[in-house]
Every structure is written in C-alpha cells, then in structure tokens.
Amino acid sequence: ALVYAQALVISFSSLLCFSLSVTLLDSRSVQGDLAWVASPMEGGWEEVSIMDEKNIPIRTYQVCNVMEPNQNNWLRTHWIRRGPAQRIYIEIKFTLRDCNSLPGVIGTCKETFNLYYLESDSDNERYAHESRFAKIDTVAADESFTQVDIGDRIMKLNTEVRDVGVLSCTGFYLAFQDVGACIALVSVHVFYKKCPLAVRNLAQFPDTVTGADTSSLVEVRGSCVNHSEEQEVPKMYCGADGEWLVPIGNCLCNPGYEERNEQCQVCKVGYYRSLSSDGGCRKCPLHSYSIEEGATSCDCDKGYYRSETDPAAMPCTRPPSAPHNLISNVNETSVLLEWSAPLSSGGRQDLTYNVVCKQCVRDTQRCMPCGDDVRYSPQRLSLRSTRVSVHQLQAHTNYTFQIWAVNGVSKHSPSLEQAVSVTLTTNQAAPSTVMMVQSKDITRDTLSLFWDEPDKPNGVILEYEVKYYEKDQNERSYRIVKTTSRSTDIKDLTPLTSYVFHVRARTAAGYGEFSAPFEFSTNTVAAPVVGGVMSSAVLLLLVAGCVVVLLLILIITFIITKRRSKYSKTKQAEEKNLQPGVRIYVDPFTYEDPNQAIREFAKEINTSCIKIEKVIGIGEFGEVCSGRLKLPGKREICVAIKTLKAGFTEQQRLDFLSEASVIGQFEHPNIIHLEGVVTKCKPVMIITEYMENSSLDMFLRKNDGRFTVIQLVGILRGIASGMKYLSDMSYVHRDLAARNILVNSNLVCKVSDFGMSRVLEDEPEGAYTTRVRGGKIPIRWTAPEAITYRKFTSASDVWSYGIVMWEVMSYGERPYWDMSNQDVIKAIEEGYRLPPPMECPLALHQLMLECWMRERADRPKFSQIINMLDKLIRNPATNSTLIKKKLRWYRIEIGIGRCSEFLVTDRDRF
Ligand code: AMP
C-alpha cells in the first residue's frame, strides 16, 4: 500500500452544472470491495481502503512499480450496463507521484496511464484478452506531487474526464493500464448526459439523452403545458453537452389563463383573458364583473350592455339619453328638424339618430307611418348630424316626428327615453309637376294632348295650363290653353312643324311648376322625349361619346400607373445615373419599409422544408447550423442556417435580415448564394448554400503548406472575380478578409458576410475598432483613407483584397502579427508595407504592394487584378522567383510609388 494515499483529503465537486448527468458507475458509492479484475493478480494494481474528507471509507486502486522496467498492469472494472446512453463520460480522480521526486527511478518511472474500453452484451468478457480492448486515451496528470504533507492533509488530486460515443452493445468494461507509474485511482465516475426536462415557450420537453456524436443534435418535439394550445409546432434540439438549443415554435395559454412562471395559470375572480394571443389576465373593464376563475370575458352590470362587435376590453355601456331642444321649421310641405345631442352618450362613440315620421288624423290620436314617398335629406336612419330636412309631405296634414338617439347597445333596451318628438301641421302647397305629356290624333294642323295628374296635387286641382310654341321660334312667343280636364285639343297649328309643349296644374294654393318640354310635330307622330327636347339619336350619340371618353381615361390611367411603378423600381438606379443594362445594388435601408426589401430580394421558405442538423458556428445574431433544404419539386440540398436568437428587437430583426436582402441581389459563383429566409415564424432564419470547409482563414491554417502556388493563386482569382462582380454592381464590401470568405468542398471560395452591423467585443486589439455603419473598422484590412475619413470605395476594397492575398499566401497568418492597431496605422502612414510571405512569388507581392498604394486612384481595379492573376496562372514561370527568407518590412518610397526592400529580419523576433 502507498503511505501517501492513506492521508488523502479529497474534495469532490460536481463537474457539470447545467446538464443532467446520470451515473452508470461511481466507485465511491460502492459498499465493500470493488472487486475489479487486476492482472497480474499479484504485484500489480491493488485495492486499498482510504478515508475521504468526511472520514467515510472509500475504495481505491493503487500501483507503484516505478523501479522495475516493462510494467504492464491491467485493472478492469466489472461490466457496466449502458442503459440509454449513446455517449459515456468517464471522470477519473487520481494522484500521481512526480518521477523526479523518486530517487533512482530514471528510465523506468512513468507519469501516465492508459484508459481502455470493451463493449459486450453481457458480463461474460471479464477475462477477455487485453488486445480486444479499444484505447480511449492516455491520461497524464495536471499535477504530480513530490511529498506528502500529512499534517495539513493536502494532496494534489487530478480530475480528468474522457468520453467515448456511438455505443452499440448493452454494456461495457473499462480498463486502466499502468506502464510503470506511481498512481492511486481515487474514484471512477462513469455517466452519460441528458438535456434536463425543460419548458420553453410554454412547451414542455422531456429529459433527453444526448446524441452519440459530440456535434450531433437530437430533435425533440415539445408538448404544450396544461391549459395551453399549440401556435406553431414546438421543437428544440438537445446538444451533446446536455444543453437545449434553438427553440422553435410555441404554445399559447388558452383564454381564461395567463402565462406565469412558465405555466398557464387561471385568471383570478374579477379578471379575464379572452384570446390566446392576448397578454396576461386583465381586470374586468368598467361596469362589468366575473364571479368565477378562468373567465374569458366579463358580464355586464345590470343596465349595461356590450354590442357584438365590442372588444372584451371595452367597458360595458348604456343606450344614450334622448336628444333635446328639437326645433321644427315648416316650409309648405317640407320640414327642417334640428336638435341637440343627448346629455348622455351612454359611454360610447357610435351615436347616431333615426327619424320616425307618423302621419296623424286631425283631432284624433290615430297615427300611421308616413308613406315611402316622403324624402329625407341627408337620410332617415343612422344620421350623424343633428339636423334633417323632410320633403314631399302632404299639405295641410298633421305629422309627428320622433328623433331617436341610437348607439351600439340601444337594441338591448329600446325605450322612449331615448327619443324626442314634435307634432306639426304642413301648410298649403302648390301641386307638384306633371310628369308625362303625350299626344294622339295628329293632323296637319291639330293634335290632342293628354297627361297624368301630378303625384302631389296638394289639394283640389282647379285647372291645367298648356304652354306651347314652335320649336324654331323664340320661347317667349308662346301660346296658352287652359282646361279643367287632363286633355285638350290644340288647333290652328302650322303643318309639318315641330312644337314644344309644357303643362302645369293649379290648386287653391296657386300654380305648380311647368312640366319638362315635350316635342310633337304636326302631320306626323313624334315619340315624347322624356325630360326634354333631346332626340333619341342625340341620346345615342351622347352615350357612345361617353363610352369613348371612359375608355380613353382608363387607357391613360393604366399607362401612368405602369410608368410610376417602373419609376419606383428603377428610381435608385436612375438616381445613381448609371448606364442602362448594368444591374445595381440597392441598399435595403433606403426602403421606407425595410421589410419590403426583404420581400423583394429574398424568397420566403416554409419551415417544413428545413431540417436542422448541427450547430456549426456562432454568428453575430445567434447560432449558425447546418441542415437540409427540400423545396417542392427540387432535390434536397445541404444548407447553412443562420438563426436570430430569441428576445430580439424589431431593429435587430431588420439588421439581421438586411444581410439576406443584400445577398439576395447577387448571383455569382464566387458570392455566397441565398436560398431564402424564414420570417413568418420563429426563429427567424437566413438560409444559404452550405460551405463545407467553412471560413478561409481557418481552412488555410488547418492546411498549412499543403497547396501549390498555382492552387493558392486559383483561390485568389475566385475571390477577385466575386469582388469584381460586387464592384460592378456598385457594392462596397468594407470587410473583405479571409475570415469572411467561405470555402466549399470543391475549394471554391465565396465572398460572404454582408451583415450591415457588427456588434463585436470591445477588445482593443481584436479585428475591429472604431464604429462605422453601426459597426467597427477592421484596422489591419482597411485602407488608410477609410480609417481616417471613412472613404469606403471599391478602391478601399482593393486594399483589403491585397491583405487577403497576403493572408492566403501565408496560410492564414495574422496581418502585421502581434503589432497594436495604432502601430499598424503609424507604420502604414510612414510608408511601410507587409513583406512577401515565405515561398510567395515576387510578382504576387508586387501586386499586393500595388493594392496598398497610398493614392487610391493608383491601385489596380479588380478587373486588372484578375488579368494579372490569369497571366500568372497561364505563365507559371512568373512564379519562379520565390521568397525564400523571412522578411519583416517593406517600405514604399513615398511619392514615387516604387517599392524597395527596407529591412530584413526574422519575423519571429519581431
Ligand atoms: P457569420 O455570422 O456569417 O460570421 O457566421 C458564423 C460562422 O458560421 C462562420 O464563421 C462559419 O464558420 C459558419 N458559417 C456561416 N455561413 C456558413 C455557410 N454558408 N456554410 C458553412 N458555414 C457557415
């Protein structure tokens, strides 16, 4: 036994705080012997009891054959049932003796041990040969110890965790191989992880065992908590660390319940909640109550009502009181009625008035409703004004008018208290107009006229008067014929002549108005013309004319509308004064409603077409996942899915989606391709093509030195081609850097990261400082004029492109290494430039230096860069002058634009 182990004080702490871990084996909790199998049985691992910090005995295994060479001591656990675990974690607490503190052991003493496992469906492999065990890892101590301080009871305890996944059998053994260390296994804890039972967006997700792979996500469907219903299918993903990720969809509390502490709690008495989309329970509005819990609406107090269209949040109201101060003003057979608004509107805004007209028999109380021929101006019902004029009443007749004040709840309690009335008598009035005059028995000099009685004689008709004249003569030279009947013969007329006739009636009140003109000719029969002297031919012409004019108006309106919409679409391009045919980038923030830009440039995708598989990165607004997209009628493709994390503001949502409205305008093989967006449900997502090799800087670092110069130039050519496309569209990227280039499985590079704002950590020496465009400037990649006075142009993008060239040729080296941003700005100002990376053709470095010309007009255009790279690719001899030594700086001779090597030192010493 090892003396130092007896005095061990162990402080166990829980390793995992958030996820749920389920123990499969805990050596400390085993009562009695562990009885694991040691081989050799003698002289190798030995089981020893010690006391932990609470003086509870625990079982440990120790071995310390540091003096003897060629040690191979195995210790195997008993068979451990796997349960539902797909990935298991092994937490080992152990102490290890520092070989240097043991005299005379050099060459034999080790400071590591090996961890193995063997899967099996039952406990019958206990003595399986060691060669069948698979190695999990070699475990080394973080801290070994040199001496034992028993007085203070302090010992250096190591905790190491290893994991292994994709298990298939029902159980497994673990084995510890010692190859000559002085080691005590204090505890072995084997467990697997679960995402704990969780409630998100009112959906409950059961505790879920994590997936087999460290990056796999387990999709779990949630079920709505009690008293709630699904608004959109709730889903979440259980990550390998036992944490829930990307909550999608949600449930809403049923009416009568509200969300509190992630549950749906019933509304208290006196409160209500009517729609599941409402906020919390609300107090019953004025003049209403609820006497039971869980009310979806409140009942009205007695005498108060609610109309069918009143929202539940509106107070209960009453019918209005009666209008008052009703005044009538009789003018012959017309009456003008005026009144004042009621003193009480009943608490509502929808007050109108209805007029009831009754015709009453003189000296009796008998009244009956007025006939349909009575006219009301502006109308009889739903009057908003407090006046109405009533026409075409009968003369010398008693009428009673009631004015009712009406609102949305009047029908619940109609009562005369809501009306005011007036009784009046109309005056005498002249008869109304004769409407129709006809003729018959026409001869060369006579014709017989006949007509209808006026609609409103307003008394006894005493006689009719006929006025007539020759059509071609002056109207003032007319003749008059009077008659008591409704017909008369007109004699002594000129043959073959057209005459115009008007007829009027007379009562005791006087003459009525003359009728409209009616035209007849002697010795022929003319059809009376209704309403005047217009012939039917004229009428026909007029109608035809109207149709033509209407058609013309419609055509003109159509042309103007077309032009307008065309203008609004091309407005920006026109404003930029560009040649026709060149497609121009449109800044989504110039739209009055940025949502309109999103609708215009990005296709809305239904979430049912998307399958999220893995989290692959963290973006500025939330997780970036990989997954699959299957659009109807198209084959399934791999996609990247950027999500907007929960709790965002509307501005953040628009900023996030602005990237989609930008990418959606581009179509080029070296620009990341937008598949579409999800904006109609949460989380809001941007779906782009999937780039298997992720960002270029990481990719190059991982593959340091593995590409030929031609391959690297090919990468640069692709980026230049994407940038030429952007500059042709008048788009300035402002953040061109290798980290913002994505690489796919065919090594095609695509420009990405078109986000409009950057919220980055405030580390002074990080990539970005100084806010622009709601973001920060990446100093090392940015042209001096853009840093100094924010002059961002395609020429400043060319400067950044030069830095990307340098990053590519140096396999992802950080530009200007560990210099501070301030020193970089100063050095550039003084004319210094980055030197050629190792193995970089001089011609390429020359191109970089041209991209870094102080005067932006002196820098090459992207089209020229492409030409130069093409030349390099076609003529590899140009690549032959390679830089073989490490250089520190180049200095451009200011004013001349010529480059010369300035200082040569070892970069690493810089
Ligand atoms: P971003 O928010 O664009 O900076 O994205 C964050 C990280 O997600 C990037 O650094 C990439 O690692 C990854 N990523 C973004 N878009 C894609 C994509 N289309 N394909 C593969 N990985 C991507």
Image (spheres, rainbow, N blue to C red):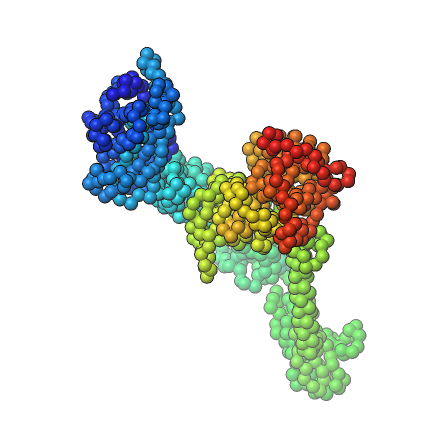
Q: In this view, does 14 lie above or below 368?
A: above
Residue closer to the observer: 733 or 887: 887
Q: Which residue is drawn at 72% across and 77% down?
A: 500
Residue closer to the observer: 199 or 1: 1
Q: In this view, does 19 lie to the left or right of 756?
A: left
Q: Which residue is drawn at 61% across and 36% down?
A: 886
Quadrant of the snapshot with the N terminus: top left
Residue closer to the observer: 674 or 324: 674
Q: Is residue 841 left or right of residue 197?
A: right
Tell me where residue 243 appears, x and y as whole percent.
39, 37
Tell me where residue 236 appears, x and y as whole percent.
40, 43
Tell me where residue 132 appears, x and y as whole percent.
27, 41
Q: In this view, does 486 lie above or below 431?
A: below
Locate residue 68: give its quadrant.
top left
Q: Which residue is drawn at 23% across and 31% down?
A: 40
Residue 308 visible in this rendered orientation of the protein:
no
Q: Residue at x 71, y 45 (%)?
A: 859
Q: Is residue 39 left or right of residue 414?
A: left
Quadrant of the snapshot with the C terminus: top right
Locate residue 389: give its quadrant.
bottom right
